[in-house]
């Protein structure tokens, strides 16, 4: 095994090992707890709950984890109840999946359709002897859920601080890269400008998702006593991610303007004139964005960018330049706005 491959394996083990160990220990604890409580058959479903429900998402609030456990329990119970009336068959499969997806519209652990209930209910049908799992097996599932909820916040809890620090760094790179790229494609052909717009939308989409996920990070600390010492740092990191999310609209607008002017022969001279002085404004704005997202006091950088903005407005009083500098004005306004609450 080469040094590079070995290094990649070691990093992956370091990153994912604690999460795997957390799941394994909780599975064993749930299994043993069900045996202590008197399970007369192997308590498979007690072990299934933590195996399926636990995730390594460090920003997941306790309520989300609880909803996910509830989805596993609901799916298992749905499968057991259906098999009291129907033998394993295509009809039973259709009923279980349909009811599971219907419940997933209501009992969801996020903003999209939750397939956890349907997936968990299929585990019941997949058992070689589903009739052995009668209604008296429900308490085993409940025992597994209780063990999962009790141990998940205590066993090698994922670090929201480490994950959010990496997310902030990535968002800084995505936004500054998107700004610089949109300026570079000004005056080029429609193909290059269109490709840049697609890239910018992917970058801002990732930043928006990071901002949305940051809202749960601080709430998660309320139920994780081992991470409460990080509360202030988590709040600051979440605030920066929300700021990055708010900057996305202006970054997208600049890319859209660059795409709109691409291929316009009637505006080619004006676009070329506007483009000559725009990199200076872009560079000053990127510095302000970078300092703000790094957690520093960006007031001096914002003031410097506004000075460059004013000089650009005087030097290039063209309609094209007005459209191109408008996104920068919005970016600077966002950087000057009061910080949004983290949670």
Image (cartoon, rainbow, N blue to C red):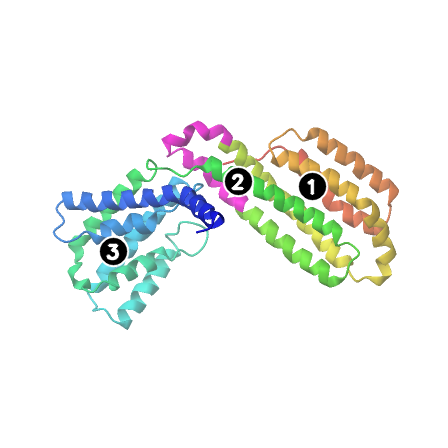
Give the percent coordinates (x, y) of residue 286: 70, 40
Q: Residue furthest front?
A: 2
Q: What is the CA distance from the residue labelled 3 to the residue labelled 2?
A: 39 Å
- Tags 1 and 2 touching, CB below 8 Å: no
Q: Are marks 1 and 3 in contact (CB under 8 Å)?
A: no
- Residue 32's spot in the image, x, y percent? 19, 44
Q: Inspect this view and state whether residue 154 appears.
A: yes
How many residues crowd around disc 1 within 10 Å: few (fewer than 14), some, or many (20 or more)? Answer: many
Query: Front-most of 144 and 277?
Result: 277
Span of residues in magenta: 210-233
Residue for point 67% across, 59% down: 195
SS class of the residue under badge 1? helix
**Label placed on residue 148:** none
Q: Which of marks 3 and 2 is in front?
A: 2
Question: In percent of the image, x 79 and y 41: which residue is there?
Answer: 280
For marks 3 and 2, the one nearer the N-term is: 3
Residue beneath the point at 53% across and 40% down = 166
Q: Give the residue at mark 1.
A: 331
Residue depicted at 75% across the width and 58% down the height? 260
Q: How many marks?
A: 3
Q: Is residue 57 in view?
A: no
Q: In the figure, 4 relative to 152: above or below?
A: below
Q: Where does label 2 land, which residue?
A: 166
**Does the stretch in magenta take in 232?**
yes
**Is 101 part of what is drawn in magenta?**
no
Upstream in sequence: badge 1 or badge 3: 3
Identify the main secondary structure in magenta.
helix
Q: Name the residue under label 3.
A: 77
Q: Quadrant of residue 224?
A: top left
Q: Where is residue 182 shown, x and y percent of the image?
A: 72, 51
Q: Which residue lies furthest to the bottom in this view?
A: 90
């Amino acid at each position: 095994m080469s040094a590079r491959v070995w290094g990649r394996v070691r990093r992956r083990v370091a990153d994912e090992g604690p999460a795997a160990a957390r799941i394994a220990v909780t599975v064993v604890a749930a299994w043993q707890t069900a045996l202590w409580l008197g399970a007369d058959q192997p308590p498979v479903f007690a072990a299934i709950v933590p195996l399926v429900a636990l995730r390594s998402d460090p920003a997941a609030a306790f309520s989300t984890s609880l909803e996910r456990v509830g989805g596993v329990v609901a799916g298992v119970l749905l499968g057991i109840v259906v098999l009291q009336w129907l033998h394993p068959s295509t009809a039973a499969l259709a009923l279980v999946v349909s009811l599971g997806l219907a419940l997933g519209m209501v009992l969801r652990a996020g903003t999209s359709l939750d397939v956890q209930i349907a997936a968990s209910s299929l585990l019941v049908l997949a058992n070689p002897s589903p009739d052995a799992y009668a209604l008296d097996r429900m308490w085993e599932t409940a025992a597994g859920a209780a063990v999962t909820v009790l141990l998940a916040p205590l066993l090698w809890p994922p670090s929201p601080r480490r994950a959010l620090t990496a997310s902030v760094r990535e968002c800084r790179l995505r936004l500054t890269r998107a700004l610089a790229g949109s300026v570079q494609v000004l005056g080029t052909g429609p193909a290059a400008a269109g490709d840049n717009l697609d890239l910018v939308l992917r970058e801002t989409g990732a930043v928006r998702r990071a901002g949305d996920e940051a809202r749960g990070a601080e709430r998660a600390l309320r139920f994780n006593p081992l991470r409460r010492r990080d509360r202030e740092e988590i709040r600051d990191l979440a605030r920066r991610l929300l700021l990055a999310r708010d900057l996305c609209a202006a970054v997208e607008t600049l890319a859209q303007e660059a795409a709109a002017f691409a291929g316009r022969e009637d505006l080619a001279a004006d676009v070329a004139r506007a483009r000559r002085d725009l990199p200076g404004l872009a560079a000053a704005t990127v510095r302000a964005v970078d300092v703000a997202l790094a957690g520093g006091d960006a007031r001096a950088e914002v003031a410097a960018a506004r000075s460059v903005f004013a000089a650009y407005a005087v030097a290039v009083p063209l309609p094209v330049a007005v459209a191109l500098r408008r996104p920068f004005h919005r970016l600077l306004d966002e950087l000057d706005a009061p910080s949004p609450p983290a949670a």
